[in-house]
Image: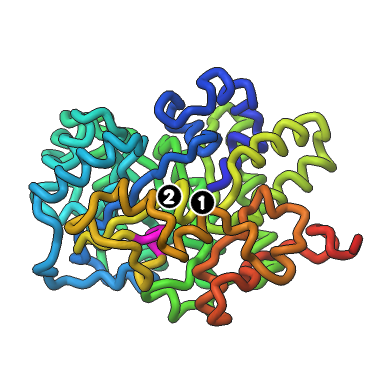
Amino acid sequence: MIGISKLYCGTVEPSDALRYGRHSGKLPSHLLQFSKDKRPVVVWNTTQRCNLKCVHCYAHAKALANDNELSTREGKALIDDLTEYGAPVILFSGGEPLVRKDLPDLAGYAVDRGMRAVISTNGTLISAKLALTLKRIGLSYVGISLDGMQKINDRFRGVSGAFQSAMAGIKNCQDAGIKVGLRFTINKYNVDEIPHIFNLIEEMEIPRVCFYHLVYAGRGTELVKEDLSHAATRSAVDLIIDETKRLHDIGKPKEVLTVDNHADGPYLYLRLRKEDPQRAKDVLELLQWNEGNNSGRGIGCVSWDGEVHPDQFWRHCSLGNVRQRPFSEIWADLSNPLLEKLKEKKKHVKGRCADCRWLDICGGNFRVRAEATTGDLWAPDPACYLTDAEIGLMDK
Protein backbone atom coordinates (compact mmCIF):
# COMPACT_ATOMS: atom_id res chain seq x y z
CA MET A 1 0.00 0.00 0.00
CA ILE A 2 1.61 3.24 -1.21
CA GLY A 3 0.20 6.48 0.17
CA ILE A 4 0.38 8.71 -2.90
CA SER A 5 -1.09 11.74 -1.13
CA LYS A 6 0.97 11.17 2.00
CA LEU A 7 4.24 10.88 0.12
CA TYR A 8 3.92 13.03 -2.97
CA CYS A 9 1.91 15.89 -1.46
CA GLY A 10 3.86 15.91 1.80
CA THR A 11 0.89 15.32 4.10
CA VAL A 12 2.99 12.94 6.24
CA GLU A 13 6.50 13.49 7.56
CA PRO A 14 8.87 10.93 9.15
CA SER A 15 8.48 12.81 12.42
CA ASP A 16 4.74 12.01 12.45
CA ALA A 17 5.40 8.28 12.82
CA LEU A 18 8.35 8.76 15.18
CA ARG A 19 6.09 10.69 17.55
CA TYR A 20 4.27 7.42 18.29
CA GLY A 21 7.42 5.31 18.45
CA ARG A 22 6.30 3.61 15.21
CA HIS A 23 4.33 1.15 17.36
CA SER A 24 1.25 -0.24 15.63
CA GLY A 25 -0.81 -0.19 18.81
CA LYS A 26 -0.29 3.56 19.18
CA LEU A 27 -0.18 4.79 15.59
CA PRO A 28 -3.28 6.39 14.07
CA SER A 29 -4.66 4.43 11.14
CA HIS A 30 -3.16 6.64 8.44
CA LEU A 31 0.34 5.94 9.79
CA LEU A 32 0.03 2.19 10.39
CA GLN A 33 2.03 1.30 7.28
CA PHE A 34 5.09 2.92 8.88
CA SER A 35 5.05 0.80 12.04
CA LYS A 36 8.17 -1.14 12.92
CA ASP A 37 6.55 -4.07 14.75
CA LYS A 38 4.27 -4.96 11.77
CA ARG A 39 1.50 -6.53 13.79
CA PRO A 40 -0.78 -7.90 11.11
CA VAL A 41 -3.82 -6.16 9.76
CA VAL A 42 -6.17 -9.12 9.41
CA VAL A 43 -8.64 -9.51 6.56
CA TRP A 44 -11.48 -11.79 7.59
CA ASN A 45 -13.42 -13.07 4.60
CA THR A 46 -16.52 -13.65 6.68
CA THR A 47 -18.43 -15.33 3.86
CA GLN A 48 -18.10 -16.54 0.29
CA ARG A 49 -21.64 -15.44 -0.46
CA CYS A 50 -22.22 -12.36 -2.62
CA ASN A 51 -25.13 -10.68 -4.36
CA LEU A 52 -22.91 -9.65 -7.31
CA LYS A 53 -20.84 -11.60 -9.85
CA CYS A 54 -17.60 -9.64 -10.15
CA VAL A 55 -15.38 -10.92 -12.96
CA HIS A 56 -12.16 -10.26 -10.99
CA CYS A 57 -13.22 -11.63 -7.58
CA TYR A 58 -10.25 -13.22 -5.81
CA ALA A 59 -12.58 -15.22 -3.54
CA HIS A 60 -14.65 -16.91 -6.26
CA ALA A 61 -17.69 -15.47 -4.46
CA LYS A 62 -21.09 -16.92 -5.31
CA ALA A 63 -24.75 -16.47 -4.48
CA LEU A 64 -25.16 -19.76 -2.59
CA ALA A 65 -24.40 -19.97 1.11
CA ASN A 66 -21.37 -21.90 2.33
CA ASP A 67 -22.37 -24.18 5.21
CA ASN A 68 -18.87 -24.07 6.69
CA GLU A 69 -18.66 -20.40 7.71
CA LEU A 70 -17.30 -19.50 11.12
CA SER A 71 -20.22 -18.98 13.48
CA THR A 72 -20.82 -15.79 15.44
CA ARG A 73 -19.32 -17.47 18.50
CA GLU A 74 -16.26 -18.62 16.58
CA GLY A 75 -15.90 -15.16 15.05
CA LYS A 76 -15.89 -13.52 18.45
CA ALA A 77 -13.26 -16.01 19.64
CA LEU A 78 -11.13 -15.02 16.65
CA ILE A 79 -11.57 -11.34 17.53
CA ASP A 80 -10.59 -12.05 21.16
CA ASP A 81 -7.39 -13.72 19.98
CA LEU A 82 -6.55 -10.91 17.52
CA THR A 83 -7.10 -8.33 20.25
CA GLU A 84 -4.78 -10.09 22.67
CA TYR A 85 -2.21 -10.59 19.91
CA GLY A 86 -2.16 -6.86 19.18
CA ALA A 87 -3.54 -6.87 15.63
CA PRO A 88 -4.46 -3.20 15.12
CA VAL A 89 -7.18 -3.57 12.47
CA ILE A 90 -9.70 -6.17 11.38
CA LEU A 91 -11.10 -5.78 7.88
CA PHE A 92 -14.41 -7.55 7.32
CA SER A 93 -14.62 -8.70 3.72
CA GLY A 94 -16.16 -11.48 1.68
CA GLY A 95 -17.75 -12.30 -0.73
CA GLU A 96 -20.03 -9.55 0.46
CA PRO A 97 -19.73 -9.28 4.26
CA LEU A 98 -23.08 -7.53 4.68
CA VAL A 99 -25.01 -10.63 3.60
CA ARG A 100 -24.13 -11.91 7.09
CA LYS A 101 -26.86 -10.70 9.41
CA ASP A 102 -24.46 -10.83 12.37
CA LEU A 103 -21.88 -8.54 10.72
CA PRO A 104 -22.84 -5.47 12.80
CA ASP A 105 -22.65 -7.60 15.95
CA LEU A 106 -19.19 -8.89 15.01
CA ALA A 107 -17.86 -5.47 14.01
CA GLY A 108 -19.28 -3.90 17.15
CA TYR A 109 -17.65 -6.60 19.25
CA ALA A 110 -14.27 -5.86 17.64
CA VAL A 111 -14.67 -2.16 18.39
CA ASP A 112 -15.64 -2.91 21.99
CA ARG A 113 -12.46 -4.99 22.32
CA GLY A 114 -10.39 -2.01 21.19
CA MET A 115 -9.74 -2.91 17.55
CA ARG A 116 -10.26 -0.67 14.56
CA ALA A 117 -12.95 -2.30 12.46
CA VAL A 118 -13.42 -1.56 8.77
CA ILE A 119 -15.58 -3.13 6.07
CA SER A 120 -14.80 -3.82 2.43
CA THR A 121 -18.09 -4.04 0.58
CA ASN A 122 -19.75 -3.55 -2.78
CA GLY A 123 -22.01 -1.05 -1.03
CA THR A 124 -25.24 -2.22 -2.60
CA LEU A 125 -26.75 -3.48 0.65
CA ILE A 126 -26.09 -0.40 2.80
CA SER A 127 -29.54 0.99 3.51
CA ALA A 128 -30.04 4.18 5.52
CA LYS A 129 -31.01 2.05 8.53
CA LEU A 130 -27.94 -0.18 8.25
CA ALA A 131 -25.67 2.84 7.86
CA LEU A 132 -26.98 4.25 11.15
CA THR A 133 -26.33 0.88 12.80
CA LEU A 134 -22.75 0.80 11.50
CA LYS A 135 -22.21 4.34 12.80
CA ARG A 136 -23.63 3.42 16.20
CA ILE A 137 -21.27 0.49 16.69
CA GLY A 138 -18.25 2.69 15.99
CA LEU A 139 -17.11 1.41 12.62
CA SER A 140 -13.94 3.24 11.53
CA TYR A 141 -14.33 3.10 7.76
CA VAL A 142 -16.33 1.62 4.89
CA GLY A 143 -14.52 0.93 1.62
CA ILE A 144 -16.91 0.58 -1.32
CA SER A 145 -15.76 -1.04 -4.55
CA LEU A 146 -16.41 0.74 -7.85
CA ASP A 147 -14.70 -0.12 -11.11
CA GLY A 148 -15.80 2.96 -13.02
CA MET A 149 -18.98 4.77 -13.86
CA GLN A 150 -22.28 2.98 -14.40
CA LYS A 151 -21.70 1.13 -17.69
CA ILE A 152 -18.20 -0.10 -16.89
CA ASN A 153 -18.90 -0.83 -13.23
CA ASP A 154 -22.03 -2.87 -13.92
CA ARG A 155 -20.17 -4.86 -16.57
CA PHE A 156 -17.46 -5.82 -14.08
CA ARG A 157 -19.92 -6.41 -11.25
CA GLY A 158 -22.08 -8.66 -13.43
CA VAL A 159 -25.37 -7.13 -12.26
CA SER A 160 -27.30 -4.28 -13.85
CA GLY A 161 -28.01 -1.52 -11.34
CA ALA A 162 -25.01 -2.29 -9.13
CA PHE A 163 -23.58 1.20 -9.69
CA GLN A 164 -26.71 3.04 -8.62
CA SER A 165 -27.10 0.79 -5.57
CA ALA A 166 -23.48 1.42 -4.58
CA MET A 167 -23.96 5.17 -4.98
CA ALA A 168 -26.97 4.97 -2.67
CA GLY A 169 -24.83 3.07 -0.18
CA ILE A 170 -22.18 5.78 -0.30
CA LYS A 171 -24.77 8.49 0.30
CA ASN A 172 -26.30 6.57 3.19
CA CYS A 173 -22.87 6.25 4.84
CA GLN A 174 -22.23 9.96 4.39
CA ASP A 175 -25.61 10.88 5.82
CA ALA A 176 -24.91 8.67 8.86
CA GLY A 177 -21.51 10.30 9.39
CA ILE A 178 -19.37 7.26 8.52
CA LYS A 179 -16.05 7.78 6.74
CA VAL A 180 -16.42 6.16 3.34
CA GLY A 181 -13.96 5.65 0.50
CA LEU A 182 -13.69 3.97 -2.89
CA ARG A 183 -11.79 0.88 -4.07
CA PHE A 184 -10.95 0.60 -7.77
CA THR A 185 -9.16 -2.33 -9.48
CA ILE A 186 -7.20 -1.18 -12.54
CA ASN A 187 -7.23 -3.13 -15.82
CA LYS A 188 -7.30 -2.48 -19.58
CA TYR A 189 -11.05 -2.00 -19.72
CA ASN A 190 -11.43 0.59 -16.99
CA VAL A 191 -8.13 2.50 -16.87
CA ASP A 192 -9.78 5.38 -18.75
CA GLU A 193 -12.27 5.66 -15.89
CA ILE A 194 -9.61 6.93 -13.46
CA PRO A 195 -10.28 10.63 -14.20
CA HIS A 196 -14.00 10.02 -13.66
CA ILE A 197 -13.25 8.46 -10.27
CA PHE A 198 -11.31 11.58 -9.26
CA ASN A 199 -14.19 13.75 -10.44
CA LEU A 200 -16.57 11.62 -8.39
CA ILE A 201 -14.63 11.89 -5.13
CA GLU A 202 -14.30 15.65 -5.70
CA GLU A 203 -17.99 16.20 -6.42
CA MET A 204 -19.30 13.89 -3.69
CA GLU A 205 -16.66 14.94 -1.15
CA ILE A 206 -15.46 11.38 -0.68
CA PRO A 207 -12.23 11.62 1.36
CA ARG A 208 -10.37 8.48 0.26
CA VAL A 209 -9.74 6.24 -2.75
CA CYS A 210 -7.57 3.16 -3.19
CA PHE A 211 -6.43 2.09 -6.65
CA TYR A 212 -5.68 -1.64 -6.74
CA HIS A 213 -3.38 -3.20 -9.30
CA LEU A 214 -4.75 -6.48 -10.64
CA VAL A 215 -3.69 -9.61 -8.76
CA TYR A 216 -3.93 -12.93 -10.56
CA ALA A 217 -5.97 -14.86 -8.00
CA GLY A 218 -9.45 -16.35 -7.93
CA ARG A 219 -11.43 -15.22 -10.97
CA GLY A 220 -8.68 -12.63 -11.46
CA THR A 221 -6.49 -15.38 -12.92
CA GLU A 222 -8.75 -15.26 -15.97
CA LEU A 223 -7.87 -11.57 -16.51
CA VAL A 224 -4.09 -11.87 -16.78
CA LYS A 225 -4.24 -10.82 -20.44
CA GLU A 226 -6.39 -7.85 -19.45
CA ASP A 227 -3.73 -6.44 -17.13
CA LEU A 228 -2.01 -3.25 -18.21
CA SER A 229 1.29 -3.26 -20.06
CA HIS A 230 4.25 -1.83 -18.17
CA ALA A 231 4.03 1.40 -20.16
CA ALA A 232 0.30 1.70 -19.52
CA THR A 233 0.84 1.05 -15.81
CA ARG A 234 3.39 3.87 -15.62
CA SER A 235 0.93 6.19 -17.36
CA ALA A 236 -1.85 5.19 -14.96
CA VAL A 237 0.32 5.78 -11.90
CA ASP A 238 1.42 9.16 -13.29
CA LEU A 239 -2.22 10.07 -13.83
CA ILE A 240 -3.10 9.09 -10.26
CA ILE A 241 -0.19 11.17 -8.92
CA ASP A 242 -1.15 14.17 -11.07
CA GLU A 243 -4.83 14.04 -10.11
CA THR A 244 -3.94 13.68 -6.43
CA LYS A 245 -1.73 16.77 -6.67
CA ARG A 246 -4.43 18.70 -8.55
CA LEU A 247 -6.98 18.18 -5.80
CA HIS A 248 -4.39 18.97 -3.15
CA ASP A 249 -3.45 22.24 -4.86
CA ILE A 250 -7.04 23.47 -5.19
CA GLY A 251 -7.71 22.91 -1.51
CA LYS A 252 -9.65 19.66 -1.86
CA PRO A 253 -7.10 17.14 -0.58
CA LYS A 254 -7.97 13.44 -0.68
CA GLU A 255 -6.25 10.41 0.78
CA VAL A 256 -5.12 8.50 -2.31
CA LEU A 257 -3.35 5.14 -2.20
CA THR A 258 -2.20 2.54 -4.69
CA VAL A 259 -2.26 -1.09 -3.61
CA ASP A 260 -0.75 -4.43 -4.67
CA ASN A 261 2.17 -3.24 -6.78
CA HIS A 262 5.02 -2.04 -4.61
CA ALA A 263 7.01 -0.83 -7.59
CA ASP A 264 4.85 2.28 -7.17
CA GLY A 265 7.02 3.31 -4.21
CA PRO A 266 10.38 3.49 -6.04
CA TYR A 267 8.62 4.94 -9.09
CA LEU A 268 7.16 7.80 -7.04
CA TYR A 269 10.51 8.38 -5.34
CA LEU A 270 12.36 8.55 -8.67
CA ARG A 271 9.85 11.07 -9.95
CA LEU A 272 10.15 13.18 -6.80
CA ARG A 273 13.94 13.05 -6.95
CA LYS A 274 13.73 15.03 -10.20
CA GLU A 275 11.03 17.43 -9.01
CA ASP A 276 11.77 17.98 -5.30
CA PRO A 277 15.03 16.36 -4.10
CA GLN A 278 14.54 17.51 -0.50
CA ARG A 279 11.09 15.95 -0.20
CA ALA A 280 12.41 12.85 -1.96
CA LYS A 281 14.78 12.22 0.97
CA ASP A 282 11.90 12.12 3.43
CA VAL A 283 9.88 9.93 1.09
CA LEU A 284 12.73 7.45 0.82
CA GLU A 285 12.84 7.13 4.61
CA LEU A 286 9.08 6.58 4.80
CA LEU A 287 9.22 3.97 2.04
CA GLN A 288 11.97 2.12 3.90
CA TRP A 289 9.72 1.99 6.96
CA ASN A 290 6.79 0.84 4.84
CA GLU A 291 8.92 -2.13 3.62
CA GLY A 292 6.71 -2.90 0.62
CA ASN A 293 4.86 -6.19 0.37
CA ASN A 294 4.04 -7.64 3.79
CA SER A 295 2.16 -10.84 2.96
CA GLY A 296 2.68 -13.26 5.82
CA ARG A 297 3.95 -10.52 8.10
CA GLY A 298 2.07 -7.22 8.21
CA ILE A 299 -1.11 -8.53 6.63
CA GLY A 300 -2.89 -11.85 7.04
CA CYS A 301 -6.19 -13.41 6.09
CA VAL A 302 -8.74 -15.69 7.69
CA SER A 303 -11.17 -17.36 5.31
CA TRP A 304 -14.87 -18.00 5.90
CA ASP A 305 -14.06 -21.58 6.94
CA GLY A 306 -11.31 -20.58 9.38
CA GLU A 307 -8.32 -21.27 7.12
CA VAL A 308 -5.43 -18.83 7.63
CA HIS A 309 -3.60 -17.46 4.59
CA PRO A 310 -0.58 -15.15 4.14
CA ASP A 311 -2.97 -12.62 2.58
CA GLN A 312 -6.36 -12.69 0.90
CA PHE A 313 -4.90 -13.80 -2.46
CA TRP A 314 -3.20 -16.96 -1.12
CA ARG A 315 -6.35 -19.02 -0.82
CA HIS A 316 -4.54 -22.02 -2.33
CA CYS A 317 -2.09 -22.07 0.61
CA SER A 318 -3.30 -22.63 4.16
CA LEU A 319 -1.12 -22.06 7.22
CA GLY A 320 -3.63 -23.66 9.58
CA ASN A 321 -7.19 -23.24 10.78
CA VAL A 322 -8.44 -21.10 13.67
CA ARG A 323 -10.86 -23.87 14.60
CA GLN A 324 -7.86 -25.98 15.61
CA ARG A 325 -5.35 -23.31 16.74
CA PRO A 326 -5.62 -19.58 17.47
CA PHE A 327 -4.51 -17.23 14.71
CA SER A 328 -1.77 -15.87 16.98
CA GLU A 329 -0.19 -19.32 17.32
CA ILE A 330 -0.45 -20.08 13.61
CA TRP A 331 1.04 -16.69 12.67
CA ALA A 332 4.03 -17.10 14.98
CA ASP A 333 4.78 -20.73 14.08
CA LEU A 334 7.85 -20.63 11.85
CA SER A 335 7.92 -24.42 11.48
CA ASN A 336 5.71 -23.76 8.47
CA PRO A 337 8.28 -23.40 5.66
CA LEU A 338 6.16 -21.02 3.58
CA LEU A 339 5.47 -18.68 6.47
CA GLU A 340 9.11 -18.75 7.54
CA LYS A 341 10.26 -17.69 4.08
CA LEU A 342 7.56 -15.06 3.66
CA LYS A 343 8.66 -13.36 6.86
CA GLU A 344 12.11 -12.93 5.32
CA LYS A 345 11.19 -13.09 1.63
CA LYS A 346 14.00 -10.78 0.55
CA LYS A 347 16.40 -13.69 1.09
CA HIS A 348 14.49 -15.96 -1.29
CA VAL A 349 13.40 -13.88 -4.29
CA LYS A 350 15.15 -14.60 -7.56
CA GLY A 351 16.22 -12.92 -10.78
CA ARG A 352 15.94 -9.19 -11.14
CA CYS A 353 14.08 -8.97 -7.81
CA ALA A 354 17.11 -10.37 -5.98
CA ASP A 355 19.42 -7.85 -7.63
CA CYS A 356 17.08 -4.85 -7.41
CA ARG A 357 18.36 -1.80 -5.56
CA TRP A 358 14.81 -1.22 -4.25
CA LEU A 359 14.34 -4.64 -2.64
CA ASP A 360 14.22 -3.19 0.87
CA ILE A 361 11.51 -0.77 -0.25
CA CYS A 362 9.44 -3.09 -2.42
CA GLY A 363 9.85 -6.32 -0.44
CA GLY A 364 9.88 -8.40 -3.61
CA ASN A 365 6.41 -7.26 -4.68
CA PHE A 366 3.62 -9.86 -5.11
CA ARG A 367 4.67 -13.50 -4.87
CA VAL A 368 1.19 -14.73 -5.84
CA ARG A 369 1.45 -12.92 -9.17
CA ALA A 370 4.86 -14.48 -9.82
CA GLU A 371 3.57 -17.95 -8.96
CA ALA A 372 0.46 -17.56 -11.14
CA THR A 373 2.50 -16.74 -14.23
CA THR A 374 5.66 -18.84 -13.76
CA GLY A 375 4.80 -21.59 -11.26
CA ASP A 376 7.64 -20.32 -9.05
CA LEU A 377 6.53 -18.11 -6.19
CA TRP A 378 10.06 -16.69 -5.83
CA ALA A 379 10.39 -15.62 -9.47
CA PRO A 380 10.25 -11.91 -10.36
CA ASP A 381 6.81 -10.32 -10.25
CA PRO A 382 5.78 -9.85 -13.91
CA ALA A 383 3.86 -6.68 -13.01
CA CYS A 384 7.02 -4.80 -11.98
CA TYR A 385 7.23 -2.01 -14.54
CA LEU A 386 10.55 -0.51 -13.45
CA THR A 387 13.30 -0.71 -16.06
CA ASP A 388 16.62 -2.50 -15.57
CA ALA A 389 18.30 0.89 -15.39
CA GLU A 390 15.87 2.13 -12.72
CA ILE A 391 16.44 -0.87 -10.49
CA GLY A 392 20.23 -0.73 -10.86
CA LEU A 393 20.89 -3.75 -13.06
CA MET A 394 22.75 -1.64 -15.61
CA ASP A 395 25.28 -0.80 -12.89
CA LYS A 396 26.19 -4.47 -12.39
Residue to which mark 1 is pinned: 294
Magenta stretch: residue 56 in it? no
- Between the residue at mark 1 and the residue at mark 2, the CA separation in whole angstroms equals 6 Å
Quarter-of-image position of residue 302? bottom left
Mark 1 or mark 2: which comes first in sequence?
1
**Decide: marks 1, 2 in contact (CB < 8 A)?**
yes
Q: Position of residue 380 (x, y in %)?
A: 65, 70
Q: Where is residue 323 in the image (x, y as percent from the top left)?
A: 17, 57
Q: Is mark 1 on a helix, strand or loop?
A: loop
Q: Please provide the residue range marked out in magenta.
A: 309-313
Residue 282, above or below 296:
above
The residue shown at (58%, 41%) is 290
How many residues crowd around disc 2 within 10 Å: few (fewer than 14), some, or many (20 or more)?
A: many
**Number of marks in picture:** 2
Q: Which amino acid does label 2 sit on?
A: Ile
Q: Where is residue 183 in the image (x, y as percent from the top left)?
A: 42, 52
Residue 202, above or below 303:
above
The residue shown at (51%, 71%) is 189
Q: What element carries label 2?
A: strand
Residue 147, above or below 221:
above
Residue 374 visible here: yes
Q: What residue type is labelled 1?
A: Asn
**Which dot marks residue 286?**
none
Answer with left or right where residue 388 lies relative to residue 263. right
Residue 176 visible here: no
Q: Magenta stretch mostly in which secondary structure?
A: loop
Residue to which mark 2 is pinned: 299
